Amino acid sequence: MPAHRRRGDSSFELGERNGEDKQTNPRTECNLQAALVDVRDSDAIEDDMTSTTGRPPVSLSLRATHIDTTNTLINGKQYFPVPPTIRVVPQNRQITARKGSTVTLECKASGNPVPAIYWHKKDAFTGASHLSESPTLLLERVDRHHAGIYQCTADNGVREAVHVDIEVTVLSTETSNRSRHGRGEMTQILNEMRE
């Protein structure tokens, strides 16, 4: 009996070849028909095979017959394009650090092809300054000049690049000692630090 799977606009049908029973002959070849295939569908195919046969996943060859190749040539290679997505650490997109400490910002991007990652620091006066092309941005011995908005950009040439901002706040050791005295003083100290 054929197995069917639908995911979004994609559909799969797994059937027996030559009328053989997959259950009794583990070496039986099967046909797999897929429509509107997407790179995310590889999980769906493996899940189908596992749940249908009750055996470990098997290797499959997928031959796509109708693929829209519009805008899939990137740097001379053909891809099944997937726009970039970003996951950042910290997830709340804010970090507070003490003066003199080390801050690590992480930007994990996925997509097909693998996105390039760029870090910039936004500045109201000079615009954005390019800092790094690595998934991890390390800020050592931070001081008030490190405070601000850092932007991670992921770009793989598929649709628009995506951006995520992370706000870094740097507290001086003086601020952390005075914070016990009350909310008003703390606000005043923070305002003085930003000036």
Image (tube, rainbow, N blue to C red):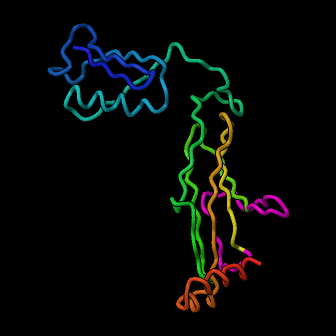
- Where is the C terminus found, in terms of image quarters? bottom right
| Between 178 and 121, the one nearer to me in the picture | 178
Q: Position of residue 12 (x, y in %)?
A: 37, 19
Q: Residue furthest right?
A: 126
- Vertical placement of residue 96 versus 27, above or below: below
* Residue drawn at x 71%, y 30% as measured from the top left: 76
* Residue drawn at x 69%, y 58% as measured from the top left: 119
Residue 65 on the magenta segment: no
* Residue drawn at x 24%, y 22% as measured from the top left: 27
| Between 30 and 143, the one nearer to me in the picture | 143
* Residue drawn at x 55%, y 17% as measured from the top left: 67
Q: Position of residue 124 (x, y in %)?
A: 80, 62
Q: Position of residue 6 (x, y in %)?
A: 36, 22
* Count of numbered badges drawn on the protein: 0
Q: Position of residue 62 (x, y in %)?
A: 43, 22
- Where is the N terminus found, in terms of image quarters? top left
Please report the bounds of the magenta region as a residue range: 122-145
Residue 125 on the magenta segment: yes
Q: Residue furthest top?
A: 18
Q: Going by the image, does 19 lie left or right of 190?
A: left
Q: Going by the image, does 122 lie left or right of 114?
A: right
- Vertical placement of residue 21 versus 191, above or below: above
| Between 51 and 25, the one nearer to me in the picture | 51
Q: Residue furthest front?
A: 184
